[in-house]
């Protein structure tokens, strides 16, 4: 892959390195994101024109029905997709950098499964509501990450293939526990849990958007601020320490940030497969940045999830698949292609 040359922007004592090709790439992703937003807001059982969408968004709509459909149903769904896709794309970028492996995404190494375990326990054993289920998913995802991190410690270092393998093992164990809970539980509760496990953007409301937005905004500066340290960690712990980076502290902090993003996404929409895997790789290939593509991966994750949502709404024979199944279906082909093409996975 050919990397983009870097430029330096100086503002007094402050200097910022940036890549023109990456900046253009991010601008194109934002443009695609805007187009997808308009398409998703205008499509559905009630087809709306671009004029209707724009008039509603700027508060000049005269049709109460159109305003209700856009502001109460479609806009929360679109914003949830943007936040979930961005969180998954960014978390995948962090995990792949730390593990130095293209398969180092939260759904592959067990963190998404761990978040699902907490939600299933709430649904099957405690008959909890949506708020309690989301909170349990966040707590369970964090606890799973701590478990994987502790088991993967090897001397003073945590990362690489060892982290991926430990995560896969923990994820497989938790997947078995999830299956046992579903089999042994009440039929109605099992159906409810299966619906949650499919991952869905249906019936998303502002109650889903606000917590996801708060969590994303809180974690985003941490991830961006430590992106340069991740670049140095990819050269090896010894080299990073010589350049003043506390390797293990940085790794733990970024894992917690990535787990937080994954848990936020899982709590908002359920388990969404392969977005965290594909978004960082596509951002690196298309953007050409030699650095960890934290921001461009977030934008790519948004685009991928919204495109998958639009695709699922326009399947033939009126097949309306949950978004989690759609990304799993499309991501499976991407994973097979990745394994066949790559010699370093």
Image (cartoon, helix red, strand yellow):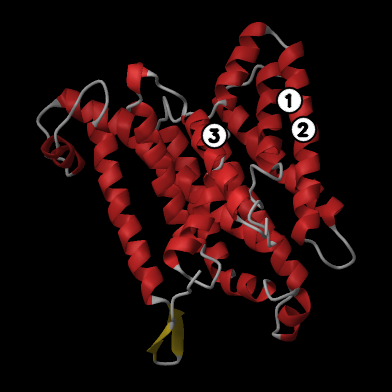
The x and y percentages for residue 13 are 45, 92
Can you identify the residue that label 3 sits on?
328
CA neighbours of label 3 inside 10 A, class few (<14), some (14 to 19), many (20+) = some
Q: Earlier in the sequence, mark 3 or mark 2?
A: 2
Q: Residue at x 80, y 62 (%)?
A: 158
Q: Is residue 260 left or right of residue 76?
A: right
| SS class, disc 1 | helix
Distance from Cα at disc 2 to Cα at disc 1: 6 Å
Q: Quadrant of the C terminus?
A: bottom right
CA neighbours of label 2 inside 10 A, class few (<14), some (14 to 19), many (20+) = many
Q: Is residue 84 left or right of residue 229?
A: left
Tag in front: 3 or 2 = 3
Q: Residue at x 48, y 28 (%)?
A: 200
- Residue 213 in view, yes or no: no
Can you identify the residue that label 1 sits on?
178
The quarter of the picture where residue 63 lies is: top left
Dot 2 and dot 1 residues touching (CB under 8 Å): yes
Residue at the outermost top position: 187
- Residue 300 in view, yes or no: yes
Can you identify the residue that label 2 sits on?
174
- Above or below, comparing residue 307 to residue 253 in the picture: above
């Amino acid at each position: 892959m050919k990397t983009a040359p870097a430029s330096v922007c100086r503002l007094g004592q402050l200097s910022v390195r940036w890549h023109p090709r990456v900046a253009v790439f991010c601008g194109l992703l934002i443009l695609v994101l805007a187009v997808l937003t308009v398409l998703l807001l205008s499509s559905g059982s009630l087809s709306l024109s671009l004029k209707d969408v724009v008039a509603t968004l700027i508060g000049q709509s005269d049709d109460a029905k159109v305003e209700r459909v856009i502001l109460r149903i479609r806009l929360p769904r679109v914003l949830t997709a943007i936040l979930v896709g961005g969180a998954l794309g960014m978390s995948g970028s962090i995990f792949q950098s730390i593990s130095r492996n293209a398969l180092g995404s939260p759904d592959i190494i067990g963190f998404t499964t761990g978040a699902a375990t907490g939600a299933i326990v709430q649904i099957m054993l405690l008959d909890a509501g949506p708020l309690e289920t989301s909170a349990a998913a966040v707590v369970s995802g964090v606890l799973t990450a701590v478990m994987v991190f502790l088991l993967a410690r090897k001397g003073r270092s945590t990362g690489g293939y060892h982290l991926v393998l430990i995560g896969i093992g923990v994820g497989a164990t938790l997947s078995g526990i999830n299956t046992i809970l579903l089999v042994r539980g009440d039929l109605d509760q099992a159906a409810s849990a299966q619906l949650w496990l499919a991952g869905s953007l249906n019936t998303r409301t502002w109650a889903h958007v606000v917590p996801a937005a708060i969590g994303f905004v809180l974690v985003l500066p941490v991830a961006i601020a430590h992106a340069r340290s991740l670049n140095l960690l990819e050269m090896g712990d010894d080299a990073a320490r010589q350049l003043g980076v506390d390797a293990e502290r940085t790794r733990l902090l970024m894992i917690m940030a990535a787990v937080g993003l994954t848990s936020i996404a899982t709590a908002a929409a359920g388990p969404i497969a392969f977005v965290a895997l594909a978004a960082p790789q596509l951002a690196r290939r298309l953007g050409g940045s030699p650095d960890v593509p934290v921001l461009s991966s977030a934008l790519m994750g948004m685009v991928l999830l919204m495109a998958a949502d639009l695709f699922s709404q326009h399947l033939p024979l009126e097949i309306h698949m949950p978004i989690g199944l759609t990304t799993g279906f499309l991501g499976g082909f991407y994973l097979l292609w990745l394994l066949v093409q790559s010699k370093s996975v």
